[in-house]
Structure formats: structure tokens, C-alpha cells
Amino acid sequence: MKLKFQHMLLSLMIASFFIGFVYPDMANAASKQDKSAKRTALMIQKIKQDAELEKTNMQAQFDMQKKKLEEELASKDEQLIKTEKSMATTERKLKSLESDIAKVKAEKTALDSKQLETQTQLESTQKILADLNAQYKQAQADLKFNDNQRKTQSTHLAETTKLLDACEIKNTKLHQFGTELIKIYDKPDSYEAVMRKESFFQLKRVELENILQAQQDKLDDEKVVSRKPAY
């Protein structure tokens, strides 16, 4: 700004000198020089005023820009402080998030291990269930076989019981018949009594009684005792 003012002042002085040199008449030259000097003084004063006004305006603009820059700088500082606080908060959240991620990973690892263990137990349980199912089917087959065997044995037992009943009836009749024969011998009629009085029969009486007693014992031994089936 100061260099611009000096340049304008130098230009005015050169112009005044040039005007005085052009006019040869000294009186006119003096008058014109005086007028020129006044005009120059007025111009210089005007230039000074303009310069002061421009300086004032520029100072006002400078102050305004300075204030604006200071406000912007303060705003930037405030934003920077907020940003730093936000970054600190973000870092804390990031650390907390990293900790949470580590916990989740640990829980996932434990869950995977538990799932693998559960899968192993499930496979073992399924194998045991399959074995039990096979055993159940075998037991059902054995039960069916045993039931068929029981039915067959029941049929055989019924047939055997029927045969035993028939044998028991026949044996009873045989025992009864033998007993009646012995009774006939013990109580003979008149004809048999006469025959037994013969000397031959008298000699053989003891032997015959022994034989008859032996036969009676055999008949008693051969008699079937009736029994009810124990089932």
C-alpha cells in the first residue's frame, strides 16, 4: 500500500514538471505551476484520504478476516477436541468390541466342542438303540419260537396225558383182575376146596401162596398212581 502511494506521488511531480517545461512563458508558467501545485496538493491530499480510507477498509477487512479465521480456528480446535474425544471413545469401544469378539470366539470354540461331544454321544446312543432294537427283535423271535414250542409241548403233554389216562384205566382193570384172581384162590368154591384137600395140593400150598403173594406184589408195584399234570 505504501509503495503504491509513493508511485502515485512521483507520477504527479513528474507531470507538474512536464507542464512547466512545456509552457515558455514564465508568468504563465508560474501561475500554471502554482495551479498545478495546488491541484497536485489536492490530488495528493485526495490520494492520502483515499489511501487512508483504503487502509481503514483493508484494516477492517483484515480484522474481519482475522476474527473469522480465529473463529474458524477455534471451531477447528473445538472440532479437533471433539474428534479426539470421539476417537478415544471409539478406541474404547473398539477394545471392548475386540474383547467381546474374543469371548464370542471362545464361546464358539466351546460350543463346537460341546456339539462334537453331543454328536459323538448321539451316534453312540443311536448304536445302542440299534443294538437294543436288534435284541428286541431277537427276543420277539425267541418268544415266538418258545410260544410255538410251548404249544407243541402242550399238545404233546395232552396226548401223553391221554395215553397215561388210558394206561391208568387199563392198569386199574389189570390190577382189579389180578386181585380178583387172588380172591378166588383165597375163597374157592366147593369144587376148588375138594381139589385143595388133595395131598398134592397140600404139599404145594405154601409154595403157591408164596407165588400168589409175589404176583400180588408185582401187581401192586405195576399199578399206576393217578397224578394231575403240574401245569
Image: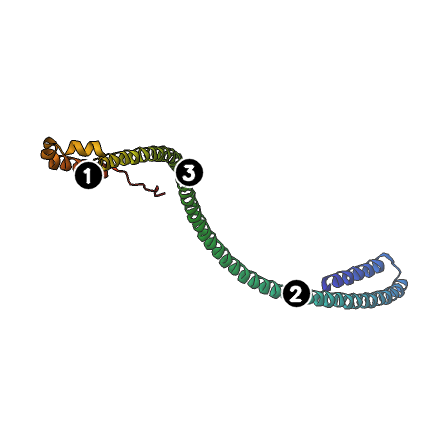
Asked whether, in this view, residue 65 is left or right of residue 196, the answer is right
Kindly identify which residue carries mark 3: 140
Query: Between marks 2 and 3, how big is the CA–CA gap?
Result: 95 Å
Q: Is residue 14 above or below residue 168?
A: below
Q: The residue under label 3 is which amino acid type?
A: Gln
Seen from the viewer's position, the closer of residues 61 and 19 is 61
Q: Quadrant of the C terminus?
A: top left
Q: Badge 3: how crowded within 10 Å, few (<14), some, or many (20+)? A: few
Q: The residue under label 1 is which amino acid type?
A: Asp
Q: The residue under label 2 is which amino acid type?
A: Leu
Asked whether, in this view, residue 92 is left or right of residue 24, the answer is left
Question: For residue 217, which numbered disc appears in the image?
Answer: 1
Seen from the viewer's position, the closer of residues 195 and 9 is 195
Kindly identify which residue carries mark 2: 73
Q: Quadrant of the N terminus?
A: bottom right
Q: Is residue 41 above or below residue 133?
A: below
Mark 3 or mark 1, which is nearer the start of the sequence? 3
Mark 1 or mark 2, which is nearer the start of the sequence? 2
